[in-house]
Image: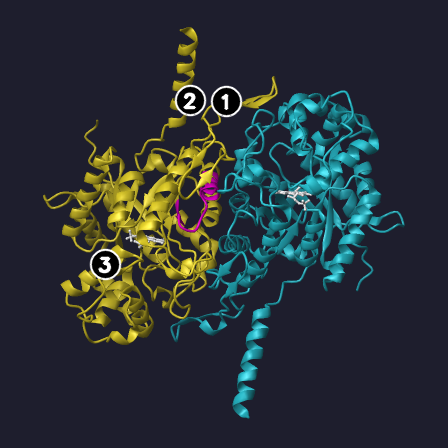
Chain colours: A cyan, B yellow
Amino acid sequence: MTDEPRQLHLNAFLMNTGHHEASWRLPESDPYSSTSIRHYTRLAQIAERGRLDSIFFADSPTLWGTIGRRPSGSLEPTVVLAAIAAQTERIGLIATASTTYNEPYNLARRFASVDHLSGGRAGWNIVTTATLDAARNFNLDELPSHASRYARAEEFLQVAKKLWDSWDDAAVLADKESGLWGDDRLLYPAGHEGEHFQVAGALNVPRSPQGHPLLVQAGSSEDGKAFAANHAEAIFTAQQTLAEAQAFYADIKRRAKAAGRDPDAVLVLPGIVPVLGATEAEARELEAELDRLIVPQYALNNLAKQLKLDPSELDLDRELPEHLPTEDEIEGAKSRFTLIVDLARRERLTVRRLIGRLGGGRGHRTFTGTPEQVADAIFEWFDGDGNGLAADGFNIMPAVLPSGLEAFVDQVVPILQDKGRFRTEYAGSTLREHYGLARPENPRRREALEAAVKGVLAHSR
Amino acid sequence: MTDEPRQLHLNAFLMNTGHHEASWRLPESDPYSSTSIRHYTRLAQIAERGRLDSIFFADSPTLWGTIGRRPSGSLEPTVVLAAIAAQTERIGLIATASTTYNEPYNLARRFASVDHLSGGRAGWNIVTTATLDAARNFNLDELPSHASRYARAEEFLQVAKKLWDSWDDAAVLADKESGLWGDDRLLYPAGHEGEHFQVAGALNVPRSPQGHPLLVQAGSSEDGKAFAANHAEAIFTAQQTLAEAQAFYADIKRRAKAAGRDPDAVLVLPGIVPVLGATEAEARELEAELDRLIVPQYALNNLAKQLKLDPSELDLDRELPEHLPTEDEIEGAKSRFTLIVDLARRERLTVRRLIGRLGGGRGHRTFTGTPEQVADAIFEWFDGDGNGLAADGFNIMPAVLPSGLEAFVDQVVPILQDKGRFRTEYAGSTLREHYGLARPENPRRREALEAAVKGVLAHSR
Ligand SMILES: Cc1cc2nc3c(=O)[nH]c(=O)nc-3n(C[C@H](O)[C@H](O)[C@H](O)COP(=O)(O)O)c2cc1C
Ligand SMILES: Cc1cc2nc3c(=O)[nH]c(=O)nc-3n(C[C@H](O)[C@H](O)[C@H](O)COP(=O)(O)O)c2cc1C
């Protein structure tokens, strides 16, 4: 061990013209960016210039709400990341995909393929997809219950891991002389027969550079945290206050430990929406301009949907109604619901002001200021205040793209580097190496060897 | 109309070290090419240098047979093509995907995404996946029947088309001034309720540059041809003799016409496996070297599987057994089965010689010779012998890659160009433009306009 101080991990969460819902209306923004691979490739290259660990795309297999309000629709993230892989060298590439609306064989294979073609840079943000709209695109009339979605997710991950481990790392012989390309004894077919899935074969892709893609998770409900403790290696989360973030951090680490895992191998990355200016006044001016560009009626409809209310129940100039559903009654995104209600109640926000706060980061911590102030805000959570840590790094969600990412990379990152808390060069080449996580061993290999040894022992008796 | 002679269309079918099953054993071959994006990108760039219409990847969601015999496993084609799109400008990009083991919302979206990120170069080779192995990776114990696979495929295409047409081309307004990004009235949700699928919403991707990806089909059974007549714009097919190819060509064009389509907008592309040498003797030497490198026992097992026989029923030095299953009894790849049996019977081949013939192109026409002879072989089928045409172009399946593709592009293509039968520059930028096919109109727009007109008329009464 060296005396190097604990190092930050930084992910850039990319979303068309930025995380502020009105960012597309700024003169500088390309309102067609959601379908522009040039735009996303440029963002990835900026993030790589800043030596960030990874970029990330959210996703849901549905057109969310109306298209009137802001750029809507988005290219499927695994193909976008494959295209970006071809134009970058080191940056990690994390795509969201749903366990509720995919088949494990197809999805495990797609991530293994991106891992191969990127030289070990693939990550999967595992989500269960919380909207009825999505269910109705997949032969269903109702949203499957929260519990049943997580039960399927659990088995999905078991199958995916069996598939990623279905080729021994040594299975390919490539022996031209004998004509033997692979060793069939080093294939470990999944042979899975479970409640949700029956998957017989081996994957049709050799084990990938990282063994498994980096596994990321982003649901903060009870079931979500339990799932994260079993499987996640990095966790994205929306936290508004240091105290809440500390509690979440401690809870995740405790659960990981209880699940028999090394808590240091489960990284917690809260979101932060930086709104940057050369001076504080400039930053505030950008923030105010963005908020002025919000169309309140669209945002109100959206908020009503998240709170399971009728839009007529919300008044822009009043606080939220007294009687709201409880988290129990929400079958969709439970933890996001609670976060929004807590924020509104805690700060006694009118619907208009709540919309402003959510418009910036949809519930994530927004922070407006100079590069130094943003760096301080990062260290406040990263180092904690003596009552425990709150983060192993951050999910950077620029309010405006590309300019907000450029500002972060060119002005904030150098401060983090000067303080010795962030890399100035990539040390490794895979996403796991960036996050300091080991390549998983193949448990099937051990099982196979044990079986072989038993066979020899039985014979020698 | 100009007097330009009828123009060839050429697709390069890419497969690791080449279509000859022993190609990986040549000193020049990279036996790890099946997971190498560099290899595939290089092949695409060679094809683009030759101004070919497109490249193509076959696919099946299963590990076929054993890994001993030849490079096995392959990266998922849509992500591979996305990566290649980033490193090429014009060449069309066709991926195979199964209607039996995908959901229409996910797959329609993925192809629309590749179409966006490639600037209109995506094509989909629609297959129903003929193996039990694949079924067993998707919760099934049995291969769904041939008829039921094609019934699902038919409805799958209906849904996919509704989804690709679910955004009007004019739906995105991007009006920063008013804050209106899109016009919700120009969304046409799928609203599909069928036997296999229920898909409510609009796609979460705006209509793509080509409207629909180019639709390609490759099954030659009765059901396959009926499906092709309804949907396919290009057809890959394995044909051994000119007479058979002519009959197939005439049949497809007739069926397309009967289905109310323009037969010229359904292109027939038989496969050809060129084995090239500077002299005929050199070409024959390469062919002989490749055949020597086949391991007969592996190939025999494979043939037995295709013929639904036990390997013990085949003898390398005899012809096929007298009693074989009939095409009716085959639930897998019906037309390939018949082709193999016909070839063996017609030429009275021993199993060893049959294996040699199939080892080169798995049932596709192989042709060994000089560049001039290969060009002549192409024209023989392209122009016909007075008894009708046999092809609108070819699916080029080099026995060895990359060298066989390089030889084709550098030595055969110039002959085709000199004769004025193949482009020397791309005229368009989309895959449809390369194949001379129109961008599909959006029928939903017409429906919506008609409904609006009716509404106005009703009001004015
Ligand atoms: C940074 C971040 C990104 C997320 N991205 C997605 C996403 O892309 N798709 C999705 O369905 N859910 C996403 N989620 C999770 C949802 O917000 C929601 O929490 C989840 O679908 C249900 O989890 P829960 O009920 O356990 O909270 C994300 C969450 C966070 C914190
Ligand atoms: C050039 C060519 C490529 C093909 N590629 C695939 C493929 O990638 N995956 C697949 O399942 N079938 C593929 N097929 C089709 C199968 O060979 C088989 O014909 C099909 O799955 C069943 O169709 P059929 O029974 O209508 O003949 C291809 C056929 C041809 C001629």
Residue corresponding to mark 1:
B185
Q: Nearer the viewer, residue A9 or A238?
A: A238
Residue corresponding to mark 3:
B327
- Disc 3 marks a residue whose amino acid type is Glu
Q: Are marks 1 and 2 in contact (CB under 8 Å)?
A: yes
Q: Nearer the viewer, residue B448 or B401?
A: B448
Query: Horizontally, is A290 left or right of B98 in the view?
Result: right
Q: Earlier in the sequence, mark 2 or mark 3?
A: 3
Q: How far is disc 1 from disc 3 in space, using C-alphas?
A: 50 Å
Q: What residue lies at 43% left-to-right and 58% top-to-bottom?
A: B140
Residue segment shown in magenta: B94-114
Q: Nearer the viewer, residue B228 or B328?
A: B328
Subunit under mark 1: B
Mark 3 element type: helix
Which quadrant holds residue B174? top right
Mark 1 element type: helix
Residue corresponding to mark 2:
B448
Q: Mark 2 packing: few (<14 Cα in 10 Å), some, or many (20+)? A: some
Residue A183 at least partly seen: no
- Disc 1 marks a residue whose amino acid type is Arg
Q: Nearer the viewer, residue B107 or A183?
A: B107
